[in-house]
Amino acid sequence: MRAIPSSLDPFVVSEVDRRLIAASADHDVRIPWAIESGSRAWGFPSPDSDYDCRFIFVRRREHYLTLWPARDVIETALDKTFDVNGWDLAKTVRLITKGNATAIEWLRSPIVYTGEIAFRDALLALANDVVERGSIARHYLHVARQQQVGAATLKRFFYVLRPAVALRWLADHPQESVPPMDLPALLAESSVPRSVTEAAMELIAAKAVTRELGAGTPPVILTQFVTNELDRAERFESLAPERDPAVVRSLADSFFRTQVG
């Protein structure tokens, strides 16, 4: 599977591809999933946004049967354009079972450099079976609250708005635990008022042509929406777990064994 929008720089995409091939060869791993994260995948890039490629890698079975395991992260050289790194499957599965929304979001990215659909779908199915909705909601709530601390900028506001809309999406989909990754999809799939959606899309359009939005005041309609959603989501702080930890661990182990067998 590959899904590369025309808006991405072909030279940069080629370099990302090269780094993925090199990482696979240098570390003797399989990379069944490699996507774009960050503002480009979240749906609100700036002209100078860097490229944040994230990937999941799987080692050969014998590499997991050692007293001296290798690092569970692979990193490539970081610069102003490229940020390419990945997580071992074991690390990814453990984080998913703990309700880490970042690991789950990688599976919903609209930008895919390379991917095995069966692997993605199986890992998504596992996430739906083991993730606590409360953990996902708390993740987005805490991310938004953290971004509200410090100097307020329009750029930072996007990092508050997206989690707020994700919380609305979770409220609108009570049987699901894995929201879309990008802001436009979150808006389209939730009950956000049309006026809020229009204001958000206007702000996205402004960011797309501005290298640095800088300090500024977001539209009142958006700040009020964020305040309401975050306040409403406080209920998730005391939400008790619903999953049996033993069942969660068993499902996670079973999935992991199928991938390294």
Image (tube, helix red, strand yellow):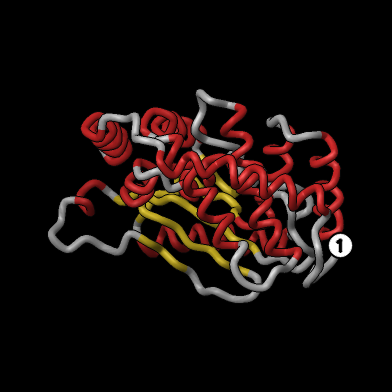
Closest to the observer, 12 or 183 = 183
| Res. 207 image quadrant | bottom right
Residue drawn at x 51%, y 58% as measured from the top left: 20
Side (left or right) of 211 relative to 117: right
Q: Which percent across, then down, holds residue 51? A: 64, 62
Whether residue 110 appears in this view of the structure is: no
Please tell me whether mark 1 sits on a helix, a strand or a loop.
Answer: loop
Relative to 51, 255 lies left or right: left
For the point 23% across and 32% down, which residue is it? Answer: 250
* Residue 154, placed above or below residue 176: below
- Where residue 138 appears, x then y in whole percent? 47, 46
* Residue that protrudes farthest toward the left in the picture: 67
Q: Amino acid at mark 1?
A: Val
Q: Which residue is mark 1?
A: 209
Q: Position of residue 54 (x, y in %)?
A: 52, 55
Nearest to the observer: residue 106 or residue 234: 234
Q: Quadrant of the N terminus?
A: top right
Which residue is found at the position 74% from the left and 58% from the top? Answer: 45
User: Mark 1 Cα within 10 Å, few/some/many (few <14, many 20+)?
Assistant: few
Q: Quadrant of the C terminus?
A: top left
Horizontal and vertical percent position of residue 190: 69, 31
- Residue at 73% x, 68% y is 153
One can see residue 27 in this view: yes
Could you say which quadrant of the image residue 83 lies in?
Answer: bottom right
Q: How many marks?
A: 1
Relative to residue 22, is residue 250 depicted above or below?
above
Q: Residue furthest top?
A: 175
